[in-house]
Image (cartoon, rainbow, N blue to C red):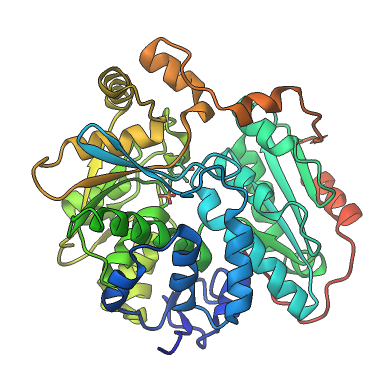
């Protein structure tokens, strides 16, 4: 089969190769990159059903990538090596439902599933091109630590993550600051997460500064973030298939829409998925969209599932593009309408996607009830997905709930829900006494600029395209 090239959802750029798609992240016209055609995996499903996770990952990536098999094999092997479970993403029964544990990577959250691949692909592509990349980003939690663990120790990549001093969970701060590799820079900045993010935005809008220091960013739109997630939907569905299930439903805790989009693409490739249940917390722009067909911005609420406290979901543009018949002109009009008016109505409806909004009380009572009934502790994000799953007809196809984080990352929510101190993980407990490295900076753009200039000063080869995660 011929491997697809990648086109922009807004149609304003020439198609690029897989390697260029990995290195550029966002399309230069502001759109998102998508494959120009999709493989049909139905003929392969029987053959794939006994494969171990890394072998399946290799088969899936080969459909989308023009890199030599030997390179992909090494990337895949190295990416899943740090996982602490032999199945990488085990699917365990919890009552009548199944829980797909996506938290066995180095930072105990599902962002590792794709970012580990991205780090290894960067290492290979930068080596081939003799280039360097300096990633900078602001984080309020999971993405920053998963990115640091994906990039640590890579020769040609440095990573600087800015977090608001004293305002992120202790476990998450330690997951970043205990990484002592010389290519990792942690900065605790005075102020809020929004202050960190607005400094990042200003640095990125300075194109000369960005090119001078070969800066790339951390965001959820890189094609690898999606591709790395398609794999576990296929793996889980095949495991159930080998037990005689012809078709599966998935319930997905949803924020930026990257996770559920990967499942939707898996269905588009012919994976037998009868329903995708997107579960949001009180930040319910997507739930409202799937219930009423209208995409409309609302205020951001702080909840017990902070990695889903998002209003405008960056990956939604890929979904719109597909729903609008892979038509970039209609997609651009839709995005422009939304940007201008804060409102967009999509005609038609989705046959497999359904959404639920799950509030804080329901999230906490689901953690308590599932622990009481089955002795299984859900993290608050996964509990949002579980609550949505429990609203669906139990007699239809089996439901797999995607577990996006280990509960030990959110001990306060677990204590609030159960009154007990149930959430521990040896890897997090072990961080308590480790040495840390973290620089403190005031909330001041020029200080951050100087910090970068002092550390990232190897002139980028001219013509290096800006690289984005
Ligand atoms: C990022 C994240 C989510 C949201 O995933 P999206 O792909 O943004 O929808 C859910 N749970 C956890 C723990 C996360 O880190």
Q: How many marks?
A: 0
**Residue shown at 67% from the left, 48% from the top:** 149
Q: Measured along the vertical axis of the image, is residue 306 above or below residue 297? A: above
Q: Nearer the viewer, residue 451 or 297?
A: 451
Q: Nearer the viewer, residue 36 or 128?
A: 128
- Tell whether 351 sits left or right of 118: left
Position in image of residue 394 (x %, y %): 12, 40
> If the picture is divided into quarters, which one holds ligand 1?
top left
Position in image of residue 208 (x %, y %): 78, 69
- Tell whether 216 sits left or right of 323: right
**Residue shown at 70% from the left, 30% from the top:** 165
Picture quadrant of residue 257: bottom left
Quarter the C terminus occupies: bottom right
Quarter the N terminus occupies: bottom left
Position in image of residue 347 (x %, y %): 17, 67
- Tell whether 163 sits left or right of 401: right
Q: Measured along the vertical axis of the image, is residue 157 above or below residue 401? A: below
């Amino acid at each position: 089969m011929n491997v697809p090239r990648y086109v922009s959802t807004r149609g304003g750029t020439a198609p690029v190769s897989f390697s260029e798609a990995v290195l550029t992240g966002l399309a230069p016209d502001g759109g998102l990159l998508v494959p120009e055609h999709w493989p049909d995996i139905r003929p392969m499903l029987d053959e794939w059903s006994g494969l171990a996770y890394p072998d399946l990952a290799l088969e899936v990536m080969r459909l989308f990538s023009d890199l030599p098999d030997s390179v992909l094999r090494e990337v895949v092997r190295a990416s899943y090596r740090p996982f602490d479970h032999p199945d990488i993403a085990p699917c365990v029964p919890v009552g009548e439902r199944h829980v797909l544990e996506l938290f066995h990577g180095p930072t105990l959250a599902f962002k590792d599933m794709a970012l580990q691949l991205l780090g290894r692909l960067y290492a290979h592509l930068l080596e081939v091109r003799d280039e360097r990349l300096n990633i900078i980003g602001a984080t309020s939690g999971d993405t920053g630590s998963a990115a640091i663990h994906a990039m640590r120790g890579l020769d040609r990549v440095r990573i600087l993550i800015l977090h608001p001093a004293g305002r992120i969970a202790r476990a998450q701060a330690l997951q970043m600051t205990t990484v002592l590799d010389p290519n990792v820079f942690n900065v605790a900045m005075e102020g809020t997460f929004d202050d960190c993010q607005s400094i990042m935005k200003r640095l990125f809008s300075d194109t000369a500064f960005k090119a001078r220091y070969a800066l790339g960013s951390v965001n959820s739109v890189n094609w690898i973030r999606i591709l790395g997630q398609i794999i576990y939907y296929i793996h889980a569905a095949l495991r159930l298939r080998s037990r005689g299930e012809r078709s599966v439903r998935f319930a997905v805790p949803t924020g930026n829409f990257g996770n559920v989009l990967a499942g939707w693409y898996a269905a588009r490739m012919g994976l037998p998925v009868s329903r995708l249940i997107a579960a949001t917390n009180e930040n319910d722009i997507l739930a409202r969209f799937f219930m009423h067909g209208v995409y409309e911005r609302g205020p951001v609420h702080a909840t017990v599932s902070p990695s889903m406290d998002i209003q405008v979901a960056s990956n939604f543009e890929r979904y719109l593009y597909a729903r609008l018949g892979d038509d970039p002109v209609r997609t651009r009009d839709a995005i422009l309408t939304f940007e201008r008016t804060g409102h967009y109505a999509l005609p038609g409806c989705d046959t497999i996607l359904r959404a639920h909004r799950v509030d804080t009380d329901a999230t906490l009572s689901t953690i308590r009830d599932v622990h009481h009934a089955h002795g299984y502790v859900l993290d608050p994000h996964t509990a949002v997905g579980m609550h949505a799953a429990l609203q669906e007809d139990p007699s239809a196809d089996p439901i797999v709930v995607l577990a996006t984080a280990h509960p030990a990352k959110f001990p306060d929510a677990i204590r609030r829900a159960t009154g007990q101190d149930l959430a521990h993980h040896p890897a997090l407990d072990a961080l308590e006494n480790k040495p840390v490295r973290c620089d403190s900076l005031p909330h001041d753009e020029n200080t951050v600029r100087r910090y970068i200039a002092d550390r990232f000063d190897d002139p980028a080869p001219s013509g290096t395209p800006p690289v984005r995660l």
